[in-house]
Amino acid sequence: MKGIKDACNEIVWDDDSQVVRLVASKHYAERACAVVAVGVAEGNL
């Protein structure tokens, strides 16, 4: 996750310290990939 968060710095957010929630899962497949979905946090988390 660290690599993906770092790659998103200055593209998706200013710094990955702004990430307040992260949900991750691992699935095995013939072709490796990463899927990233980003949303805006509003209200109390």
Image (cartoon, grey):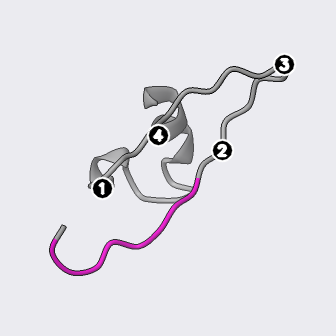
Residue at 55% across / 27% down in the picture? Answer: 26
Which residue is the site of mark 2? 35
* 22 on left or right of 31: left
**Of pointers 4 and 3, the one earlier in the residue sequence:** 4
Q: Nearer the viewer, mark 2 or mark 3?
A: 3
**Of pointers 3 and 1, the one earlier in the residue sequence:** 1
Considering depth in this image, is 2 or 31 the residue closer to the camera?
31
- Residue 45, above or below 3: below
Which residue is the site of mark 4? 5
* 40 on left or right of 45: right
Label 4 and label 1: CA atoms lie apart by 10 Å
- Local secondary structure at mark 4: helix
Q: Sort mark 4 into few (<14), some (14-19) or many (20+) by Cα contacts within 10 Å.
A: some
- Residue 11, above or below 26: below
Label 2 and label 3: CA atoms lie apart by 15 Å
Q: Nearer the viewer, mark 4 or mark 2?
A: 2
Magenta span of residues: 37-44
